Image: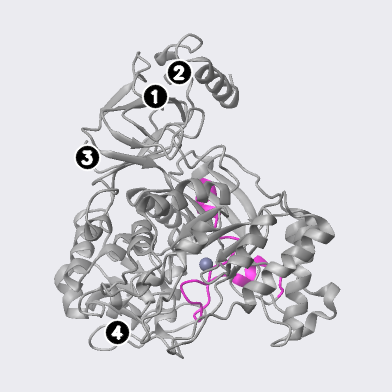
Amino acid sequence: MSKLSRRDLFKAAAGMGLGAALPGASQAAQGAKGGGPDGDQAGDLVFVNGRIHTMDERNPLVSAVAIRDGRFISVGDASHPGGQARVVNLHGRTVVPGLIESHTHFVSLANRPGYHVAEWENARSVAEVCAILAGRRAKGDVPPGGFITAMGAGTPRMFAENRLPFLAEIDAAVPDRPVFLYQGGGGPARTNTLGKAFFESATAPLAGPCVVAADGTIAGGNPNMANRALYHLRVRQSFADKMRSAIDAQLYSASVGITAVLDQTLVARADGSLNPALYDPQPTDALFTLNHYRMYDAWLQLNREQRALIRLQINFLHNQGFIAALGGLDKQLPELRERLKNQFPFFGDGMVRTGGIGEWGAVLALPTANPDNYAVWYEAQRLVAQARWRNENAQAGTLAAAAGSVPNTAPIELVVSTYETMDHDFGIQDLRWGLQHADYATEDQLRRLKNLNCGVSTSGFRWLGGNPRTDGQPIGPYYPRLVGSGIPLALHEDGIHIAPHNPFYAMHYASTGLNVFGQQVNPGQQISRQQAIHMYTRGAAWYLNRENEMGSIEEGKFADLVVLDRDYFSVSDADMRRTRAVLTVVDGKVVYDSGVL
Ligand SMILES: [Zn+2]
């Protein structure tokens, strides 16, 4: 019997009332294909004695759920299916649906060279960074000469000392393996003594050795030595290395509760070429520059082997503006045109599938600022509408830091009015187009987007880079306005270069307005924790076009849930920001288990 038909059977059975129509638990276990990361067959899984926030308003808080063949089959107090189910006593712990990140560049994290420690984004000091590096070494699986790496997301503002560790500090933590720390999306970087020796003598076809300062600093800027160092690591990555990195990244995601991501790709170079071989690593490539044709290969291979741990939905970002060498408007956007002709939207399986065009289909420009780029951008909107794909634009509007300044919402207005034109010309209301960030969207703009059946995924990353305004005005987003508009609404971090992946930072910011230094930067613009987590579950599921499969704990939906290490809903603000998973289930399988249950 195929997996699909079994699932349909269980769904139907669950609807009729649990038990009578179901095969025995042992049969179900034998019939389940695949298995978890360790290759075990997936059996029934029952959680009891919890505080399970389903995010289903008809049944918001239950104590038990039962899972079979990747789906919730019972949600409520009397849910034990009997048989050979593994029963997990939650001892009163808080459970929420698997969290969904609706705007990320996560596949970059899954391609990191070295034995990467994404965990460093949770460190609060140089000492904690060093402890995380030492912990990675202590696992015992990094071979001699193998690099321990931490890249992206970590910016000095996150650490009490407002800097990365120096060479001597890294040496003290990891004396016998090279270490490479790379800050944000473009460096600078730091290394230890063994790393310094490697980079100062490294050669590869496109670059020679790097300059490394005595304190371990590898400079960013121009020329960017940090990017050259990154190149030396990237060209030495094997496919097996990339698969290991992809697993590590997914495991980290599960540890912070994210069970599904909408990835916004990354584009190597927007030069109009359709030749993937041109996009292999270059010494000038920054961390966010990847071969956008090949960056999914390791993840796709893991999925073929049924080893993927979290769900991936792939949006296709197109970065091409006007390229004079291509000729007239009908020759512009070669990659987007091929994409729309040769790729299927929302195609794949439950674990990996395509999405739409996002976070943009072309470089957005106001007609007055750059008429050529505007014409190309407008043509991109038209092509996507004509092809009947999902479309997105990432436009925050801008807000000058000067006292008394008001947001410039002209870019959002351009997006909204163009969507209205596209709806008039092609009809887009069944396609659920989206606006990303939308931090300063007006009530009128939100109402018009809602009328077009569009959704918004707003940002939660200003906690990291945001500073208080001198006039005391909020820096945004204007969360209450967004929530009050009634538009389908998600919340994102936009990791994993400009911000971390950890969603609890975004939910903390949305509900407190506090930045990384504990300063109030968004006064009067807070929403409740319930509203914030709604955006990371129900709202995000709608945004991914998957509200019938994900976003709440309901019978028949994908069995994705997170057991939290504290009660997100009631702990202090400072504590809430530290929330982590103790156990995470995706597709009915335990993919992360800290061992406390
Ligand atoms: Zn982004």
Measured in 3D between alpha carbons, the distance from the residue under mark 1 to the one under mark 4, in whole angstroms, is 50 Å
Viewer-nearest of discs 4 and 2: 2
Left or right: 515 in relation to 349: left
Viewer-nearest of discs 3 and 4: 3
Q: Earlier in the sequence, mark 3 or mark 2?
A: 2
Q: Position of residue 11 (x, y in %)?
A: 54, 23
When the figure is inspected, residue 187 is found, relative to residue 594, above or below; the finding is below
Residue 147 shows in the view: no
The one nearer the camera, 237 or 31, is: 31
Q: Main secondary structure of the magenta part?
A: loop
Q: Which mark is residue 43?
A: 1
Kind of residue at disc 4: Thr
Q: Name the secondary structure under disc 4.
A: strand
Query: Are circles 4 and 2 on residues that touch, CB within 8 Å?
Result: no
Q: Earlier in the sequence, mark 3 or mark 4?
A: 4
The residue singled out by tag 2 in the image is 28
Q: Residue at x 23, y 86 (%)?
A: 215
Measured in 3D between alpha carbons, the distance from the residue under mark 3 to the one under mark 1, in whole angstroms, is 19 Å
Residue 460 shows in the view: yes
The one nearer the camera, 172 or 447, is: 447
Query: Are circles 2 and 1 on residues that touch, CB within 8 Å?
Result: yes
Q: Which mark is residue 217?
A: 4
Quadrant into which the N terminus falls: top right
Left or right: 558 in relation to 423: left
Q: Name the secondary structure under disc 1.
A: loop
Q: Earlier in the sequence, mark 1 or mark 4?
A: 1
Q: How is the image coloured?
A: one colour
Kind of residue at disc 2: Ala
Q: Earlier in the sequence, mark 2 or mark 1?
A: 2
Which stretch appears magenta? 272-301
Q: Residue at x 78, y 78 (%)?
A: 375
Neighbourhood count class around disc 3 (C-alpha, 10 Å): few under 14, some 14–19, many 20 upward? few
